Amino acid sequence: MSGPLPGEGAPPPADQPATAATPATPATPAAPAAVAELTDGEWHRLHPATPLLKGGIALIVVLGIIVNNAREWVVGFFVPGGRRPDGDGEGDPFGYVVEHGYLGFVLLGVLVVVAVLVLAFWLSWRMNTFRVTEEIVEVRSGVVFRTNRRARLDRVQGINIQRPVLARVFGAAKLEVSQAGDDANVSLAYLRSVAADDLRREILRRASGVQRSAVDGVRAAPAQAAPGQVVPGQPGQPGQAAPVDPRQRFVGLVEQRAQDFLSDGLDPQEAPPESVVKVDVGRLIGSVLLSGYTLFLVAAAIAVVVSVRLTGEFFLLFALLPAVLGSSGYYINRVTKSLRYSISSSRDGIRIGYGLFSTTNETLPPGRIHSVRVSQPLLWRPFGWWQISINRASRSSTDGSGHQGNSTLLPVGDETDVRRVLELVLPELVGVAAAEVQAEEQAEEASVPPAETGAGTETAGTETAGTETAAGTETAAGTGPALAEPERAVVHERASHTLSLVEDGLTSRGSEGGFTTSPRRAAVLRWFSWRRNGFRTAPGALLLRKGAIWRELVVVPLPRMQSVGLSQGPLLRRLRLAAVHLHTVQGPIIATIGALDQDDAMAFFEGAARDAVTSARADRTHRWGASSAPVAPAAAAPAPLALEFESDPSSAGAGAPSSSAGEQDLSPFADAPRDAPREEPRP
Amino acid sequence: MDRLDVAEPAWTGISPKYVWPEFVGWLITGLLAAAATTPLWFIGAWWCYAITAAVVVVMVVVMAFVPRRVRSIRYQLREDDLLVRRGILYLRFVAVPYGRMQLIDINRGPVVRALGLSDLKFVTAAASSGVTIPGLPEAEADSLRDRLVELAESRRAGL
């Protein structure tokens, strides 16, 4: 019975020193030992407890059932005064087997089955290998049917680390590298928990295109932190001193496990430890209770009461009873999934974590969010709560804990929370960075070099002419924050009275916030919302504001928009109205706005089509760390975009900006190999 | 009332021969729909025949508009994107930047092939884009595909 579990209690001793040494080394220029070992381009095996975590649990359950069946017999066998089972053994398979003398055969059969299963699990573990090189991550698995999946690192859509309860007990974690498409994820299940965190960091580093020395120079310098305080609180981490004595080592191991279990999987050196948003448990429960589903339940209850009063029969009650009974499960599920929600900014994008016992924690690099929706269900309105969902390119058909994180960015939050989250997601539209964009606009008017983090590092990059030598990036990393710090303070102050585009769109109506709304005659189609139903363009994004009762605001980042459509049916045509569709990758958000004046719609359509080309050309989030400093990825990445946009209106031609200041600043990017052919048609 | 159009209407139409595949398609649809109503004849009431007649009339009207609808399918290659429009009653414009191209399909159904035509489909990462240019002469479809691929190569964008 203990056959399949030789190594599940602890990783094999050979691995142990690596585990203990891992957290101690990250400040050194080289990658941590465990990662260096995993990412050396050679094939590696997964955590030894993997078979157990993946499917071995079922085996244990089956054995448990057998033992449970046999329990009475065993007790009766050894305790003379106990109840002897009666002779026929009906309904008791174990009793039946023993009565008829098949015990030997059955035991043999069970042993064979167990042996085969153990062998199968061991083989599958043995055959399941992965490797990470500079360019790709590749997984081979399967015994009879071999699968080989290889994913390019520069196409990473996100990295997800899941820790189911049981895996956490073993100190294991599942790492998923999301790629665009349905079920296109590369899953490494399971890895050692610490190794998973390190591996994620290393994969993201390689995906970002940034040089290693630059990373280590600014590691643990979050968006707002002063550049001086590098790696705070690292030496004090528990469980990292490598004890020599085996017994001590075991204690250290247990301690580390406990530590892993208690920490929510957010790697302390990667992200600022605290989330920018705290989701209060009371608010979470309230938000779930006040969801649309509750409206449905209330409507159902009223329908039942009315029908019973009118007809005196209870058929409707019985028809709806299962749904009502099932609802408690739905509510509990919704709440537990969102417990301990956290979102924060890290060097490689946004870090989202949630889950109480089984935790999930995901990193979304910049530019991997295809559209954002801030919405407010009707019942949330008195409380001023909002929800944020996103469209993203990777989709998973399997449900599970990854599902919610796939589309919900903020389960519930008030306007401040929304602002904070959007500041991470759409830095160029909200908050400090939005103010920076404005400051830049003014700075450019005064023909002064833009004083802003991203722009500063770009200037540094220009000197190295885009060759991206380690030294060049390091210079950028070193000087960037130092220059930006006082500027940032000024900008911060300015931000407090800068109008934020997105926040404006939440509750405003009419032309407030620069929106173009539906005309009066659209009131036939948009009874209540025609004053609110509108769109506007912003630097790098399009905003659609909809709904007077169910308010929502959809933001589509221009570099992510795939195409744009305009449609007009007979009814709209009569009213001289039209609808505009912004096509993004498939997801819960459909960015469509109807009932616009047809001339406005056509202007919007043409403008969006033009801007989409321009911004896609300027977009560098594909290799987000390549040419801008990794200090403040949120602020630095979209900066060239904003620059490009300012130069856009001046050039009337379709997306061929004349040689303005914006273009000059972008020149270092031109040397990136994938952009080389694109530059040719330009003047 | 003016039809809604873009600022620089430099449209290219598709082959007028494309009306035939459309005709055949609608004819088959119409016949199937009419055939589906024939069991009603066994009831014997007058309105049962009227339903069949109505189906036939609707199909005839739809087919009468086929030439105009085919004429309305147009496209233009702008500097950075492909613009497609179609529809008379339900007008639809779609602009797809070349860099967004994931792949291009060329399909040839039996009737389309008999007429020496091809249907071209431009696929992006967004399922809702739905850009198709049906009824292009075969050689033109191939050259258009090559041109689009070339344009997409020179303007490659990520997702």
Image (spheres, rainbow, N blue to C red):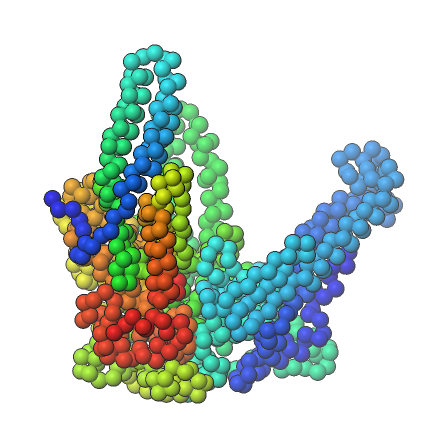
Q: Is residue B141 above or below residue A136?
A: above
- Nearest the eye: A601 or A554: A601
At which x and y percent is residue A232? 48, 83
Q: Which residue is located at x 35 percent, y 44 percent?
A: B117
Indicate the quadrant containing the C terminus of chain A: top left, top right, bottom left or bottom right. bottom left
Q: Which residue is located at x 53 percent, y 69 percent?
A: A136
Q: Which residue is located at x 40 percent, y 46 percent?
A: B107
Q: Visible in this render: residue B56?
A: yes
- Nearest the eye: A541 or A492: A541
At which x and y percent is residue A524? 17, 42
Q: Visible in this render: residue A557?
A: no
Left or right, B104 with reference to A356: left
At which x and y percent is residue B112? 37, 41
Q: Which residue is located at x 50 percent, y 51 percent?
A: A397
The quadrant holding residue B54 is top left
At which x and y percent is residue A630? 41, 78
